[in-house]
Amino acid sequence: MIIVPNAKTLNSNPRYCSVSPPYIAYESAYSILSRFALYNVIQGDALVKIFAPSKSQGNGKRSRLQNLAHSAAVNPSAIEECFALDRAQQDALFLVPSAVPSSDHIAAILRVCPVCMVRGVHYSLFQYSLIKQCPIHQVELSQACQTCGGAMDYSLNSRLFREPYGCNHCGHLLRLKGSQSGQSYLNRTGLNRLILAHRVFERGRKHQVFFDITQPTNIYFDNAAQFSSAISDFAVHQRALFNEVQAKAASGRCDRRMGFYRVGNISRCSSLKNPVLELTVKDLISILKCIFRKIRKRFLPEVKLSKRKLAGVWRSVEECDVPRQGYQLVGYLDWLCFWYGVKTPSDLCAKARSCINKKLGAWLQSKRTHEVFASLKGACERNWLMTKILAHEVIFFMTRQIRRLSESDLTCSRTNPSQIVYRRWVGPAAWALIVLPQQTACEFHFSARSVFAELGWSKVSKPAQRETYASLSR
Amino acid sequence: MDIRDTRPVEIDLHPVCNQRYLIPTFSIGETYALVLKVIRRRDSGLVIWGHTRYGKTWAMLYCQQCLAQDFPDFPIVIYNAKREISATKGNFYNSLLAVVGHKQWNDNVSLSKKHLRLVNFMEQAARKDSRQVFILFIDEAQRLQQQHFDWVKDIYNDLRLKGVTLLPILVGQQQLLDQKEAFLKTGVEGEAIVNRFMLYEHPFRGIREKEDFATCLGFFDSTPYPANSTWTFTKFFVPQAYDNGFRLALVKDILWDTFCDAYKELKLKSKMEIPMQYFSKTIEIILRDSVDMDHPGYTITREFSLRSIRESWFQAATRNSKAADPNA
């Protein structure tokens, strides 16, 4: 039989060498581009030219040095042509905007797990700076070359791909060296941890999960000392909290012994047609009062506040020398002042009413602009969530402060070694909201760490209270 | 006129008019069977040789098309060797990269990088099929020098280490056999090349028998174009005659005898062998020129076929090839 040659077989389009494996679940753009570089023996500038976004993409300027965790850092058509990935796989190579909405917490330098690098894998999750360990091997992510200590910019630049899987300063591989490399296998539990860590991002992609970590800028600072201590501690606490809350939210379980709580609004779904009044400051004031009353009764039962006692504390409690036994009382007073929006405990009697309106009004306004509220359908749900967030923030900061007495890094007073210097602990508060997709109405779960469960009853005897008030009024 | 009588494409766009078709002769069938055997046994070393214009390149293309149909994931490429004054490794790798279809074949990079690119590309292409074989037809292989074979050997060995078999099939003229003799005389190095790439020869023939000739004519009567239509190649050019029972295979005697007469005019002692090039050209002229003469009683006359054979330059080319090589 006569054959009329197929034009496709005769003139095959030039292409790049396909990579093997074509795709590894959860891998990053760095990982797949390094594999491309290895198979095609194309490195540095030549590779950047292939994948650089075109000038027509975006605002007309070539954004070659955009963070590689952002999908705008590469040309999507080049990725499509070279790797034949489906849309979901292509999105998963990047964190922004598919997994997280903004570039907050995206590391600017390459972070690798040396054990994963033995297999030539770099997961996109590693570039999320709140994650400090590899979920598979539970080893610290490395931000610098183990040989020369050099760090590498995580952007589509020729230096990053000068040596695939290697350091661009010294050329050594970033993988674990020598005999230890045998640990690189992908074990089942490690893989489960990786999947768990990504589940949250996957939900985030469908706008089903929201994380919030209160930033230092969101928190009120009375003075420079608070600010500087908060800044120094912030990154560590933020990361730890993120890991904990993320894992708990992803697992769908709560652990009360560990101080986690998880509440759902399942029975509270409102009909969208029924108008529900928006939450006001007045509603929040009663919640706030209730929380403080309950904390005092439950954890500080012996503390009695009176106008006469409060009026004596006429200056800010920050940086005051206080007796160790009275630390919880001072912490309680300080955070009471914070939420009432007054500078000193004495103002609680005189200015409380006007200040609390202002303080909670500002808080309410700041939360209403949060992206999570745009996705909630009913006013009833929004109100419910607002009260949960307020309660979480109040309880979290307060309990964290009271628990600091058991920590060893409290500063002793210079004048009286038996006393300690009180500093307001300002750190991050994290919570996660998971919106369940099955429901036509709005069903969601709020997960957070309250530290409430770790807090015990504190004895503040009457003499200790007297001494504390005396030290604060001195 | 009935719409069904309208040709599906314009005459000038038909494969016969732009020589975009492949016709299987007996020798092409034999060649394809050998290629299949080579793949099955993973034997490298097949040499297909034949005289110029006999249709070796078309045979290669035919094998490529058939393999693409039978084994869709098989990587099959045809490398057309160029005559070079001195062999240059970089240029050779560049042209191989271009032939296999690497997008950056023309990059100015080191030889080792080019080599790696080539090996990686061929390896990944071969891995798409479970047999892990890469077929490389080298046309005009008599132009390759010993260095070229050494470089192909390097690629062959590297692919072997990766579990992929490179099957280079050399296609060229009779000088390939002389080259084989010459390599064997150079010693161990030459022997390694011969045993790897030139182990057994297959002569490629033109049309020698009347049955083969008739079979080829029959293909024009039976192959439709466009596929799945009723417009066979013959019907496309002479639809009225075709509907009235005209077939090229039915005039095989006239055509064969005219070829024999044309050959006799050359006064050559050897047996007639029609190179594919001139057979196809003759049929193309016959079909193209019959368009205006088409009527229900149309048939091919001896004079018309003789004129077509002459215009295909069969006689001139045969005379030239005998003059160039009296033993042919």
Image: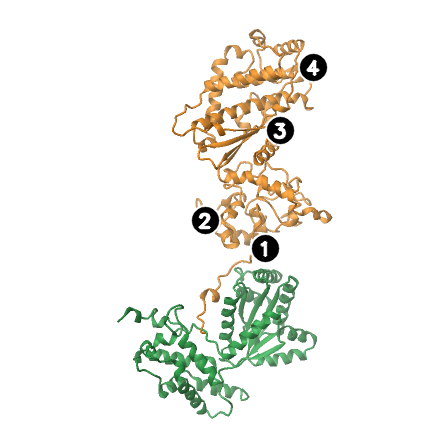
Chain colours: A orange, B green
Q: Which mark is residue A55?
A: 2
| Of residues B3 and A56, the one drawn nearer to the viewer in this rendering | B3
Q: Residue, x 43% and y 72% (percent of image)?
A: B20
Quarter of the image with the N terminus of chain A is bottom left
Side (left or right) of A379 relative to B106? left
Q: Secondary structure at mark 3?
A: helix
The answer for which chain carries disc 3 is A
Q: Which mark is residue A20?
A: 1
The answer to whether tags 4 and 1 share a subunit is: yes
Disc 3 from disc 4: Cα separation: 26 Å
- Asked if marks 4 and 2 touch (Cβ < 8 Å), the reply is no
| Of residues B319 and B241, the one drawn nearer to the viewer in this rendering | B241
- Asked if marks 3 and 2 touch (Cβ < 8 Å), the reply is no
Mark positioned earlier in the residue sequence (4 or 1):
1
User: Disc 4 marks which amino acid?
Assistant: Thr
User: Disc 3 marks which amino acid?
Assistant: Asp
Q: Secondary structure at mark 1?
A: loop
Q: Residue, x 49% and y 69% (percent of image)?
A: B65
The answer to whether tags 3 and 4 share a subunit is: yes
What residue sits right under mark 3 in the picture? Answer: A233
Q: Residue, x 52% and y 79% (percent of image)?
A: B27
The answer to whether tags 3 and 2 share a subunit is: yes
- Asked if marks 3 and 4 touch (Cβ < 8 Å), the reply is no
